[in-house]
Amino acid sequence: MLSIDRLDVQILRLLALDARTGVVELSSALGVSRNTVQSRVRRLEDAGLLTGYRLELDLAQAGIGVQAFIALEIEQGRLAAVVDNLAPIAQVLEVYATTGREDLLVRVATPTQADLQELIERVVAIAGVVHSSTRLALTTPLPHRSIPLLEEITRGAGWGRSNPSSTS
């Protein structure tokens, strides 16, 4: 497990706002040397905490306005096979293994509700799926985030050996 401090979190916060921010811009914004930022980013990448720089899309702007969550109950021993059958379906955005009655939570997106119905029929026809329950996503009032959690767990961690030029 990687130990992170407030400087690491501030670097990640700035990258979360704009993943294209360069090392020089980061160092200037944080008041630390370019080498410090570069070594911190490399350490976060090498440790597997920073796993990539992702493009975020507004699917509705691309004409894909319906998003839903399909909760699936799976026959015992069939979880991997069901996931293997979900993976090639382009409308499947994410799959989470969960606890409770349902074993998988599948986030999907389609252009229309009719397309969603066809997708649900395709998903429930997969061998091993016992039961499904679908919920439409109306809006996303709080999109995916992780920086507030990292800020909370590093609240007393300080800035490591680096000191910002201004107090934060």
Image (cartoon, helix red, strand yellow):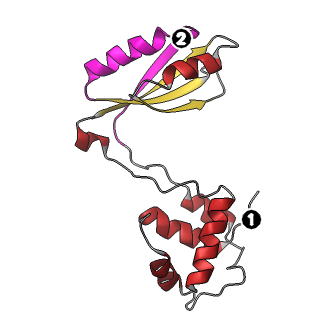
Residue 19: percent from the left, percent from the top? 44, 63
Q: Residue 17 versus residue 86: which sits nearer the camera?
A: 86
On residue 49, the disc is none
Residue 8: percent from the left, percent from the top? 62, 71
Looking at the image, which residue sits at the far right?
1
Q: Is residue 140 above or below residue 124?
A: below
Q: Residue 80 versus residue 58: which sits nearer the camera?
A: 80
Query: Which amino acid, mark 2?
Result: His
Query: Which amino acid, mark 1?
Result: Ser
Q: Which residue is mark 2?
A: 131
Q: What range of the chain is rendered magenta?
A: 111-139
Q: Is residue 104 left or right of residue 109?
A: right
Helix, strand or loop status at disc 2: strand
Q: Which residue is mark 1?
A: 3
Q: Is residue 153 magenta?
A: no
Helix, strand or loop status at disc 1: loop
> Residue drawn at (33%, 14%), measured in percent from left and top?
118
